[in-house]
Image (tube, rainbow, N blue to C red):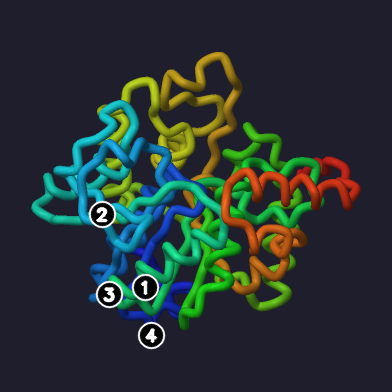
């Protein structure tokens, strides 16, 4: 059993050289691992990139342009938090060299340079942004936007990038309740993008899939090497995909809180990047920004122009 065909995978048919990039940083790149495994099995050339929260100046590796470090199992650096290095180390244990092209969070004007450098270096024709969670779908007038800064810098830069094929994939429906994201508006976003033809379907990761098994092994490997800094998102996604439900805690980091693990957490939701970017009400406030604080001010300036909609409870 493996990933079945659906509109998103059909849209990838002409794609040859694909970059899977974590949109929001940290473990987001790990959320792309099932796609990595599947697409490589289809004969595609696939690369990984990550907006890193690690201390990259401490690490060793080849530089790509001014802003990107090619991280692999020998990069050293921050032992306490370095999911990109540990992911490459996990692949090395399987006999594969899989670097993770890593860069620090910055504004869209810097991010587009990063993407352009990677397009040139890797001869890419496709970019897929991966979000662990669903706040990347917020348009801007919801009760909470979650943690939009890194996600929207990635989206804004990718929207400006000239590349034949660009997509967004979200994994972890329901996890962003922790950041006060209203999931009724997540469903609204999916419906809106369905109406415009920009929703490319959804599919579950199940325990029998080798792609899911690889992700579960990688998440366990990485988290064991970063005790106390395990990914709440990815451990929840894996646990949900293994059939755990309700107030189940796969990591001690969530003890004392109430969780609601459910089968939707282990589903990919897939979109065109163009459609998702066009729906965002405040992307133009960000596109000319270079630094993270400029982006923060841009978001705040936008929020001063709108009245947030009320929280909506899903009537089920």
Task: Give me the disc on residue 70.
Answer: 2
Which comes sooner in the sequence, label 2 or label 3? 3
Q: Residue extending furthest left?
A: 95
From this view, report whether residue 144 is shown above or below residue 134. above
> Do the residues bearing badges 2 and 1 touch, measured as CB atoms within 8 Å?
no
In the rendered image, the quadrant that contains the C terminus is: top right
Q: Position of residue 232 (x, y in %)?
A: 47, 32
Along the horizontal axis of the image, is 316 left or right of 126? right
Q: Which residue is at the front of the view, 298 or 283?
A: 298
Instruction: Classify residue 186 as left or right of residue 119.
Output: right
Q: Which residue is mark 1?
A: 119
Q: Nearer the viewer, residue 192 or 263?
A: 192
| Label 4 element class | loop
Q: CA distance from mark 4 to mark 2?
A: 27 Å
**Earlier-in-chain disc, 2 versus 1:** 2
Q: Give the alpha-carbon distance from disc 2 to disc 3, as whole Å.
A: 20 Å
């Amino acid at each position: 059993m493996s990933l079945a065909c659906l509109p998103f995978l059909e849209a990838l048919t002409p794609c040859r050289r694909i970059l899977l990039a974590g949109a929001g940083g940290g473990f987001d790149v790990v959320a792309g691992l099932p796609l990595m495994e599947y697409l490589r099995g289809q004969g595609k050339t696939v690369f990984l990139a990550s907006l890193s929260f690690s201390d990259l100046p401490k690490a060793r590796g080849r530089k790509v342009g001014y802003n990107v470090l090619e991280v692999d199992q020998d990069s050293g650096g921050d032992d306490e938090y370095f999911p990109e290095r540990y992911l490459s180390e996990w692949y090395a244990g399987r006999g594969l060299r899989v670097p993770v092209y890593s860069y620090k969070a910055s504004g869209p004007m810097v991010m587009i340079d990063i993407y352009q450098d990677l397009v040139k270096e890797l001869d890419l024709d496709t970019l897929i942004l991966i979000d662990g969670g669903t706040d990347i779908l917020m348009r801007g007038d919801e009760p909470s936007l979650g943690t939009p800064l890194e996600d929207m810098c990635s989206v804004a830069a990718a929207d400006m990038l000239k590349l034949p094929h660009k997509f967004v994939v979200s994994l972890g429906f329901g996890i962003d309740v922790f950041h006060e994201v209203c999931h009724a508006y997540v469903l609204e976003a999916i419906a809106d993008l369905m109406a415009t033809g920009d929703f490319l379907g959804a599919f579950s990761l199940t325990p029998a899939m080798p792609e899911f098994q690889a992700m579960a092994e990688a998440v366990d490997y990485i988290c064991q090497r970063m005790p106390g800094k395990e990914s709440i998102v990815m451990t929840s996604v894996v646990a949900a995909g293994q059939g755990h439900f309700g107030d189940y805690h796969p990591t001690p980091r969530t003890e004392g809180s109430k969780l609601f693990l459910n089968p939707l957490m282990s589903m990919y939701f897939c979109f065109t990047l163009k459609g998702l970017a066009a729906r965002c009400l405040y992307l133009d406030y960000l596109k000319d920004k270079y630094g993270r604080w400029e982006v923060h001010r841009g978001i705040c300036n936008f929020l001063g122009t709108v009245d947030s909609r009320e929280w909506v409870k899903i009537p089920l």
